Image: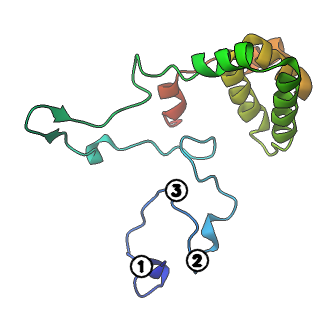
Amino acid sequence: MNYEQLPVNRCPYSVNNYERDGAMRLDGNAGNAPNYFPNSFDNIIPDESYKAQPLELDTNIADHFNRNAEGENDHFSQPGIFYREVLSDHDKKNLVSNIVGAMKGISGPKKAEITNRQLCHFFRADIGLGMAIAMGLGVNVEESQSLFPHKTAVEQMTPIK
């Protein structure tokens, strides 16, 4: 129930998050704005002061697991192995075709930036996969690299001043 959207129940202080959908939306459901973080369209960064404190248990301490922490941030080895060692040539072609078809729908002023960022993910998984997708999109990889130098995840989340 979205009772908190009714003007009489609404908090007078704005909260910026990516919660969307639900029954009886009254506020336009954030329109076509992205509902994921991080994204290319805002400079919101997490406020660490709101991070929950570790829980003290009988034998250990439980804390927040940061899946992007140093040593925990290998999101590309398994997809690369899957692409190289599991998929047949036919399945690889279908995968590339599906990704290219979806990425051709990217539009707007940040199209090149978003396309380049996604291509970087595919290249990290497998160079052949990245090249196949880049070719399908008609992207000149060398030119794209010079336009968008690599940034770390932390640099990508740091707002421009």
Q: Which residue is mark 1?
A: 10
Residue at 78% across / 18% down in the picture?
Answer: 129
- The residue nearer to you, when weighing 25 against 113, is 25
Residue at 57% across / 77% down in the picture?
Answer: 23
Quick one: label 3 or label 2, which is nearer the N terminus? 3
Q: Are marks 3 and 1 in contact (CB under 8 Å)?
A: no
Q: Is residue 39 left or right of residue 144?
A: left
Q: Which residue is mark 3?
A: 18
The answer to whether residue 149 of the structure is visible from this angle is: no
**Residue 69 spot, x, y in % from top left:** 39, 24
* Three-letter amino acid code of the residue under disc 1: Arg
Identify the mark at residue 159; answer none if there is no mark.
none
Task: Give me the C-alpha separation between circle 3 and circle 1.
Answer: 17 Å
Residue at 79% across / 12% down in the picture?
Answer: 128
- The residue nearer to you, when weighing 101 against 95, is 95
Q: Quadrant of residue 76?
A: top right
Task: Give me the C-alpha separation between circle 1 and circle 2.
Answer: 13 Å
Q: Are marks 3 and 2 in contact (CB under 8 Å)?
A: no
> Would you place residue 45 above or below residue 24 in this image?
above
Q: Is residue 66 left or right of residue 96?
A: left
**Residue 14 spot, x, y in % from top left:** 42, 66
**Residue 84 spot, x, y in % from top left:** 73, 13
Q: Is residue 120 left or right of residue 91?
A: left
Q: Secondary structure at mark 1?
A: loop
**Residue 122 spot, x, y in % from top left:** 71, 22
Q: Quadrant of residue 8?
A: bottom left
Q: In this rendering, which labeled residue sits more in front, label 1 or label 2?
A: 2
- The residue nearer to you, when weighing 18 against 151, is 18
Q: Which residue is mark 2?
A: 25
